[in-house]
Structures are given as structure tokens and as C-alpha cells.
Image (cartoon, coloured by chain):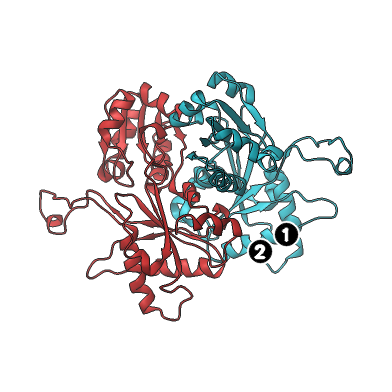
Chain colours: A red, B cyan
Amino acid sequence: MFYLIGLGLGDAKDITVKGLEIVKNCDKVYLEAYTSILTVGKETLEEFYGRPLILADRELCESSIDNVLEEAREKHIALLVVGDPLGATTHTDMLLRAKEFGVSTQIVHNASIMNAVSCCGLQLYNFGETVSIPYWTDTWKPDSFFEKIVANFARNLHTLCLLDIKVKEPTEESLTKKVRQYMDPKFMSVKEAAQQLIHIIENHPESEINKSTTAVGLCRVGAPDQKIAVSSIEAMQQCDLGPPLHSLVIPAPNLHPLELDYLAQFR
Amino acid sequence: MFYLIGLGLGDAKDITVKGLEIVKNCDKVYLEAYTSILTVGKETLEEFYGRPLILADRELCESSIDNVLEEAREKHIALLVVGDPLGATTHTDMLLRAKEFGVSTQIVHNASIMNAVSCCGLQLYNFGETVSIPYWTDTWKPDSFFEKIVANFARNLHTLCLLDIKVKEPTEESLTKKVRQYMDPKFMSVKEAAQQLIHIIENHPESEINKSTTAVGLCRVGAPDQKIAVSSIEAMQQCDLGPPLHSLVIPAPNLHPLELDYLAQFR
């Protein structure tokens, strides 16, 4: 049996009672460590669950997943995923592979940023398509996500922007070497996201979205030290919300009075 | 202190460990019983939590919420909500009222249909605006949600359709009487939703969405007897997925190969 278990967003106690029971009874438990992070680390989770965890990086979840599923034919194996386990394509793919292997699966859902973003007071049913903002490099500055934000804005919909995460990324130099070297992990802040957005806005002076458009910065959603900040995109460039994870929302231009009242708390 | 605690989607064990600890330690715990339901009832939850719960209907959550918040000035009061606690406007409103009362609040997030819908294999970031399909009456047949589905479809986005729930609705006749009488609770099925959609499609023969457009029916998401069915909207009119809650998805016209493969399991 193969279990995909969501851990929610904050700390060790955000796992569900159902999820915790499975974790305690499994033969082997992997902790996915590259699509998102909790506010606590592997050791804290191990202590809370009373059992060891095995870190699962991208290589294990993608190229080596068949070995895990092979094991799951005879044993109870769980993969713990921050947020909801079906937020990323990788996990849907795993479930299809499991079917090919004849391995039964169970999914334990949990909160993810896709629904917990409502903590800022913007209503979930007024969100349009979600976008991802990638880290730019000197030579690669994609901005196609901006069109999607503009399209949502034109339909009076909010946009949730998921911000880039780089964990265990091989350095460019090491790609051709035998021994892989990895970059330090980095997590895009609302400040960095706002800076990239301002660059794009400067290249699109005709756009409905400009420097003074409102942005909502969210940080460590679901944790006791969660922070929310509301300002113009321009001012968001100077907004320091502290440690990761961060997310950004560009609200629709015309808000419901209740949404306005709720956001006003964070200005 | 006032706590809003999400119960997730399936049964008693879908509460988080954090949520359960709070429930056990509160002075009074209300169970919201009109925006959604679990697959288990109040008695099962009371047994699992080892404490009594007070049913909270619409009147309590809207007109009488000030009394609850008044109590929360001195005591620990929790309101349990199926799914994530911030899925409905009512709860955002409660948090604003709590602030006016000077009452501290804590939100415990959980899975909701807004993220768990990914169990059908459609990727969350490819969903557009969510719509609600209301029960029609003889004299009231709103269809404005259809335009939103069409707009999502035109942008190659999926639409999650939340289906109507009628719990503790006063009968029309009783509205003018001193003693309120209530209708039996009813929950729209994917079958009923498909029937209403077919009516609308017949009135919009020029639309991109027609009788043979694919629909995904979801039922009791997150529960052990969860069911997913994929067919044309026309065929969905004959699809019986069993007890509530049901939801419907109209997928985008062009799907990712992984989405196609995953959906194929449910045809």
C-alpha cells in the first residue's frame, strides 16, 4: 500500500489524526523536501511522530519512484507532502505509476496554500487561474505569468502567485561533472516577486496593472507567526515579511465590501 | 478566544491534531451544520472528541453570532466547520466582528473541496473561477454561472461547480407565520446539476460547451467510498453516484497528457 499524506502548512500538529495514525503504522515513511517546506524541520517531525523519516528529493520522487512502489507491493509505505498531496503534478504521476504496479493507494488531504490563501479575506470563489513566478536569471526572464494576472484582473478575479523555490538544484558547473554540487536552497520573497513584477510593468505601460495596483503579501500561512501585508506593488518591493514561505496575491480591481474591510486590517 | 476549526472532508479523523487539541480544551464547541456536511454525523464526532457539541444553524452563525463572541471574551469557544473554515463569507465576517469585540481568534485550516478536487487528476493551477449551481424553482432559473464556465473554457481552464445545499430552509408558507417550519434537507447531485446544465445548453446552441462536452462528477471526496465519474454532460444526467456531497467539474477543452491519463481511469 502506498499512502500520500498531506502535512498542511504550519507545524507538526497540522497533520490530520488519520494521517498521523498511518504514519505511526507504516513500515517506511518518506518526507518530500523539495516542493515546499513547513516551519519546522525533519527532526521536529520525527520527534512528534516518534519514528524516523527518510528525506525524499526530486531524484527519488521522479527517477527512483519505481523502487519505492516496488517496496509498496509488500509493505506499507507513506510519502509525506507539505500542503495537500495533489498540489503538484509529480504526485498525480506517482498514483498512475502505482496503478501500473498494481499497488493500492490512499490519499490523505490537508490544507494547502490554494485554499488557505483565504486567510487574507479575499474570497476563494473570486480567484482566477493561479500562476507561478519563477526566479529570473541574467539570461532567462520569462514574464508570461503577467498576461494571466492581467486576464484575471480584467475579469475582476484575484490571482494567487506561487513564488519560486530552489531546493537541491545542481549548480550549472556541476551538470557536466561526475559529482553533483548543489546550490544553497532559496525561497522567493514577496519583495523579490514585487521587484520582478515592477520590471514587467515598466515594459508594459499600457497594462491595466501598474505600480500602484494593490498587492497582498502572505508569509508562513497557517503558522502562529503568519504575516499578511497589503500595499501597492511598488511599496511591496520594500516589504520584509521574514522567513519563507511567501506568496503574493494581486486582488481584483473591484472588491466586495467585506473583502475591503478585511484587507484594511493589513495595510 | 474564538477558534474557527476546519474538519476536512471525510470523517471524524480528518480533523488535524492541532484542531483536536483545541476541541478537547475548549469551554464550548459549536458545529456548523448548514454550509456543508461530513460523511458522519454529530453523534460520531461527539464520541470521537469525547465531548458534547452544539449544532449551529444559519441563525446562530449570522444573527446571533454576537452572543457567541460575547461569551468568547471570557471563555474558549470553537466553531467547527466542514472543509476549510474560510471557504464561506460568513466566517470571514465572524472574524471581523470578533475584532470589534476585542476577541482574539485562531484559524485551523484543513482540506476543502477547493483543493481536494485535484483527486480527479486535474491540476489545481489550471482551474479558473469557481461557480455555484443553485437549485432552480418553477419561477427562478438563474443561469449566470454558465457564462463563467464558458469564459473559463475559452481560456482553457477547468471549472469547479459547487452544488447547492438546502439545510434548515424555512418553507415559503411558514415565512409569514409565527412558528417556522423547515424543508427536508437536500443536496444537489451531479445528475441534477447535469440536467440543469443541459437545459441551459439547449438555450445556448451557439456555445462552445455542448451536450457532448466532458464533465467530471465527484462524490464524497476524501471519504473511503469517494467516487469519480467521467462522461459527457448528457450522459452525466443518468449518473447516480450515491449519497452527498457531490461536486461537478467541467474540464478545459485541451488537457495535459497526464490529466487525460488520470481521467481515463474514471470513464
How far is mark 2 from mark 1, CA to CA?
8 Å
- Badge 2 vs badge 1, beta-carbon distance below 8 Å: yes
Question: Callout 2 environment at 10 Å: few (<14), some (14 to 19), or many (20+)?
Answer: few
Q: Amino acid at mark 1?
A: Asp
- Above or below — where is B50 with respect to B16? above
Give the quarter of the figure containing the N terminus of chain A: top left
Q: Secondary structure at mark 1?
A: loop
Q: Nearer the viewer, residue A163 or B51?
A: B51
Give the image location of residue A72, x and y in percent: 35, 29
Q: How far across and down, in percent of the image, does residue A191 sit?
A: 32, 61
Q: Is residue A150 left or right of residue A236?
A: right
Q: What's the amino acid at mark 2?
A: Glu
The answer to whether residue B121 is above or below residue A14 is below
Farthest residue toward the left?
A178
Where does residue B216 sit, x and y in percent of width and height?
59, 48
Which of these two is toward me, A267 or B58? A267
Q: Which residue is mark 2?
A: B147
Crowd band around label 1 with a 10 angstrom C-alpha radius: few (<14), some (14–19), many (20+): some
Residue B98: name its quadrant: top right
Tag count: 2
Task: Pinpoint the chain carrying mark 2.
Answer: B
At x 29%, y 49%, the residue is A243
Q: Do we see residue B108 in this rendering?
A: no
Horizontal side, residue B155 vs residue A27: left or right? right
- Residue at the disc numbered 1: B143
In the rendered image, the quadrant that contains the C terminus of chain A is bottom left
| Residue B101's disc number | none
